[in-house]
Amino acid sequence: IVYHVTGLRLEEPYDAAPCATRSSRWALVSASACSAPTAFDTAATRDALVAALTETSDAENPFVRDITLTPSQLDACDAADSAFVDSVDGGLVSVVVDAAGACYQHVHPDAYSVRDATRWVSEHDGNPVATAPGSD
């Protein structure tokens, strides 16, 4: 039994802006331009992320792109850009950018990873609440 992982939040220890680390994962939101791309403080930050998304060797993956910023892209990309910070709680915001004619969103590094759960399913007796009579 194989599953892909979704719904993972960008919280500690994965709450780093994509400019704070060399590598990050981006999910395809739309095959066309974003309806509301993130407004960055500087064009250099946006441009560095767009360049990395466009130049990645992972471009053939239809669901996600894993990028690694080059040293010059890392220098241009500002991890302190206010676009990365939620104005309400100060947490990391999942930014959205247009790249290569498509819309991408920064996601958890394990989003869409595939896991083999065959052994776990065969050894796990299930959640008692979920397997109780009358539960959906």
Image (spheres, rainbow, N blue to C red):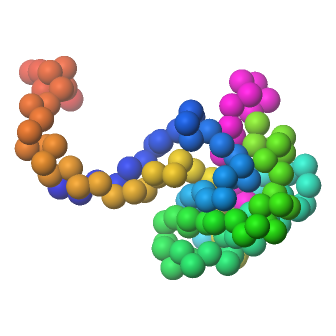
**64 or 32: nearer the eye?**
64
Q: Quick check: 50 left or right of 7?
A: right
Q: Quadrant of residue 32?
A: bottom right
The quadrant in which the C terminus is found is top left
Q: Position of residue 49 (x, y in %)?
A: 74, 63
Q: Which residues are magenta?
A: 86-98
Residue 104 visible somewhere in the drawing: yes
**Which residue lies at the image location 14% right of the left edge and 43% below the top edge?**
121
The quadrant in which the N terminus is found is bottom left
**Which residue lies at the image location 81% right of the left edge and 68% below the top edge?**
72
Magenta includes 49? Answer: no
**Which residue lies at the image location 71% right of the left edge and 49% below the top edge?**
20
Q: Identify the residue at the far front of this view.
A: 71
Residue 32 visible somewhere in the drawing: no
Q: Position of residue 69 (x, y in %)?
A: 70, 65
- Up the image or down, 50 lies above or below 111; here it is below
**Which residue lies at the image location 14% right of the left edge and 21% below the top edge?**
128
Q: Identify the residue at the far right of this view.
A: 42
Q: Position of residue 35 (x, y in %)?
A: 73, 57
Q: Position of residue 102 (x, y in %)?
A: 66, 70
- Please name the predominant secondary structure of the magenta segment in the image: loop
**19 or 50: nearer the eye?**
19
Magenta includes 97? Answer: yes
Total numbered circles: 0
Q: Quadrant of residue 81?
A: top right
Q: Quick check: 57 left or right of 93?
A: left
